[in-house]
Amino acid sequence: MQSFKIRGEHFSMGTFLLLMLVAFAFGVAVRYMWILAFAGNEAFMWNNELMINTNDGYYFAEGARDIISGVSQPNDLSPTHTALSRMTAILAMILPISFETLILWMPAVFGGLIVVPMMLIGRFLGSDMLGFLAALLSSIAVSYYNRTMIGYYDTDFFMVSFPLLVLWGLMYSFKHQNPWIYMFAPIIASFAIFWHSGQVHLLTGITAVALLYTLIFARKEIENYQALALMAIGLTNLPWFLKIALIIVIGSILARYGHKLNTKTRIIYIGSTIVFYLIFGGIGWIGSILGSGYFGRFRDIKELEEDLKFFHVLNTVRETGAIPFETFAVRISGHVYTFWVSMAGFLLLLWRYKILMLGLPMMVLGLFALQGGLRFTIFAVPLAALGVAFLILWLVEFIQKNLKKPMPQLLYYSISVAIMAIPLYPNIMHAKAYMVPTVFNKSEVQILDKLGEMADREDYVLSWWDYGYPIRYYSDVKTLIDGGKHSGGTNFPVSFSLVRPQIPSANMARFDVEYTERSFRQRCGLSFECMLKDRDFNDPMSFLKTFDGIMIDRPEKTRDIYYYLPLRMLDIFSTVAVFSNIDLRTGEQVFKPFYLAPRSYQNDPESINFGSGVVLHKQGAMLQVGEQNVQVRRFVTTEYNNEGKLQVSTQEINSNGPVSVIYMKSYNRFVLVDEAMFNSTYIQLFILENVDDRLFEPLLLSPLAKVFKLKI
């Protein structure tokens, strides 16, 4: 134990704050590399500012926009109630910068504030240098950087800082036992849960470990129990402002009269708080954990056990699946070697400072990422950074002890920073290479902006869920699915409309929109479930067959529907198809569609090699798929002329061939599809512009995105 000591030293408050500012500036400066890479590129700018680079950001931007304008229609799903949207709206009305600039920079500025709790924890452990070094690394570690980079406008920029502040607040309360300090952690916890409701799980875990620590190492310290009892109020499901009011009132009473309370009164207070917590959230939280309510959503399932068997979206999301160890280690510390160093350092820290066990829930949640998915690695970053910093300072201290004369203080700290540059380097290189583009480019946004001028705010735009939030933000319309509303049941009708031919597509779109609106009033379940109940069908597959008729008895039209079909859907269309290519009675795949849209290929005189064992032999127009050879049905070429009009030429080869080859000459891309996918609405409308004018009206036709208005 004694051999693993570092120099414990508190700098002056001025120096401490200066180091905090340096660490903050360092984190922002690394993030600025993204600006340097994209600034001045008109394709990524809108309203004279770079656009954001995360889809979910448009969700909160929509809410902030509607708060500022004071306009929001019923059931538009605009998040005007969320903390981030409210915070953004307030800042937008106060700060002399554009809304676009504000949401672009918020992640970097507020994400950089992680250095505050890191340096506070370092000071608590007795070494400001420990906090400073850990702050440098944690502020730019791969996982944390990815979710707080410039343009990543989302709730993530406070998701780690809040638990760290709670961690520091509890540790500080236990050490100093000042009733006024007791209020800090529960107040921060109240804000954290309001910021993101999922924080309650992690904060409850920290509180539970804090209680365990007290029972093991400080069981006779009644003040610790008082602090935890106050913390329990912050973990309830009461409104945040009411929780904070209760915390301040009770905390003030404890501060003034706590020393006068006898043991019996204190026990009554603690017991009453526990009961209060159980009534207002505790029982529900315990039940959700026992029922796997939190972790159960990461199971590999097609859908929860229901009458209709939909395909679950989590099966297609990489963030919720197991990840390779190297990826896991790099995201936490920047390099596999650094990861092992960080784990060793953290264990030594935990050995030396038992109170740091309060941070174990964060570390465990971060390590859970190995099986649970990428998103959790962010929680292990700060504690891993503390581990690295601790070992660096111990190494310098070891060198110091073996020198014949004391090392000058400036040299001591300079060497420490120089060694920290080693683990910082791969993280900086990652930031330099991680040039995530904006969600949409300017040309796509121009399409959506024009669509917003054509459509009413009550109209719906049908597209895949990946584009839901940006569509709502730029066009100010409604969508059927988006980044938050994309369960298997809600995705099914939209997938059906994109993958099936134009007649069933149009019918389903009208049904889905009208029954979605009806479900807001009747609460009959998912729109498709409402359809089955209303049309008195027990067999969903028989019901779907009725959509093939153009004269089907459709619901009365109450609003317009627009199809937004972007080029970027080409890369995910096979995934889109999965959601409706199932038997809803069994959840099994109906057929195996053939779809291939490679981004690159090798063109030789005799063949075109698309990779993955797929080769088009020009002589005889035979397509080799693995060991099987099939005849090409047709060869289609599309090209935009000088006037921007699409020209389509079709060469029929063999009417019995199962596969068609489409060459999109203007894009220099091939698309290989079977007959079912060839006849899909997306392929027919976007790639071929082959429109059934009984059903659709072309409105906006661009090489990057096309908009069609549904007539029926």
Image (cartoon, rainbow, N blue to C red):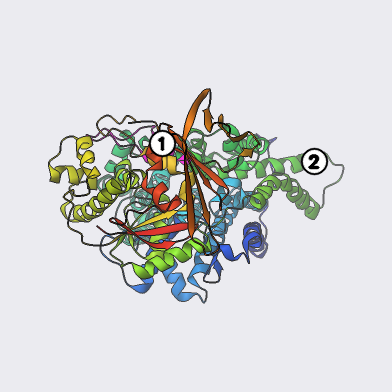
**Point 66% across, 55% down: residue:** 10
Which residue position is annotated with label 1? 315
| Residue in the image at 37% along x and 52% along y | 482
Q: Say which quarter of the image contains residue 470.
A: bottom left
Can see residue 315? yes
Q: Nearer the viewer, residue 712 or 194?
A: 712
How many numbered discs, if any? 2
Q: Are marks 2 and 1 in contact (CB under 8 Å)?
A: no
Q: Which residues are magenta?
A: 299-319
> What type is the residue that disc 1 sits on?
Asn
| 572 or 195, nearer to the observer | 572
The percent position of residue 582, horizontal first and vertical second, equals 32, 34
Give the percent coordinates (x, y) of residue 131: 63, 51
Quarter of the rendering occupied by the N terminus? top right
Which numbered circle lies on residue 399? 2
Indicate whether 622 appears above or below 46: above
- Dominant secondary structure of the magenta stretch? loop
Q: Earlier in the sequence, mark 2 or mark 1?
A: 1
Amino acid type at mark 2: Ile
**Measured Cα–Cα span from mark 2 to mark 1:** 52 Å
Q: Residues within 10 Å of mark 2 (few under 14, many from 20)?
A: few
